[in-house]
Amino acid sequence: MNRLTHLDEGGAARMVDVGDKTPSHRVAVASGRIVMNREALAAIRDGDVPKGDVIATARIAGIMAAKRTGELIPLCHPLGLEAVTLDFTFGDDGVSATATASLTGKTGVEMEAMVAVSTALLTIYDMAKAIDRAMAIGEVRLIAKRGGKSGDWEAPAG
């Protein structure tokens, strides 16, 4: 079994010491989706939501959140991200979001990508809740990561 890196020998929470790690290029991709009724989906797609451009606002919110991940997630290192992108895809019953975060550094950016997606989806909910309060956010997960000592990883298909 893998040792839990955020616990010391006595079981107390700790921030992992990355001081001796060699910097490498690191990339993480995360995705998630929000399911909604047809009226809300059409309003977002057509730019008819009274609060404004939902997708543009969600993109900015996700990027801003990724940059603040170290303040939101306990024991997460504050990172100087080099890039964060958010892409959105409209489906028949909702919107999917995919975030990519990258940097050259001593620790990975998986949490930053997942925080970006989560915040973007929450922003969509906030901006369109007057149209559909029953929207559901889900399927937030890491899709892939590259770089670092543990190497590359990709989520199984399906």
Image: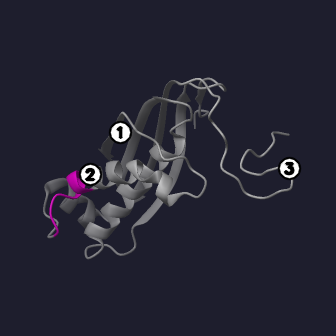
Q: In whole angstroms, how far apart are the C-alphas of marks 2 and 3?
A: 40 Å
Q: Would you say residue 36 is visible in this rendering?
A: no
- Determine whether the residue tagged by mark 2 lies in a helix, strand or loop: helix
Marking on residue 9: 3
- Determine whether the residue tagged by mark 3 lies in a helix, strand or loop: loop
The disc, 2 or 1, on the residue closer to the chain's N-terminal end is 2
In front of the other: label 1 or label 3?
A: 3
Q: Which residue is located at x 31 percent, y 73 percent?
A: 132
Q: Label 1 is placed on what type of residue?
A: Val
Residue 124 sits in quarter: bottom left
Marking on residue 84: 1
Q: Which residue is located at x 40 percent, y 73 percent?
A: 134
Q: Nearer the viewer, residue 12 or 133?
A: 12
**Does the magenta portion include 72?**
no
Mark 3 closeness class: few <14, some 14–19, many ≥20 residues within 10 Å: few
The disc, 2 or 3, on the residue closer to the chain's N-terminal end is 3
Residue 37 sits above or below residue 98 on the image: below
The disc, 1 or 3, on the residue closer to the chain's N-terminal end is 3
Numbered range of the magenta stretch: 51-57
Q: Would you say residue 13 is visible in this rendering?
A: yes
Question: Disc 2 designates what residue?
Answer: 60
Q: Nearer the viewer, residue 5 or 137?
A: 5
Q: Nearer the viewer, residue 4 or 121?
A: 4
Q: In the displayed structure, does residue 38 sit left or right of residue 119?
A: left
In front of the other: label 2 or label 3?
A: 3
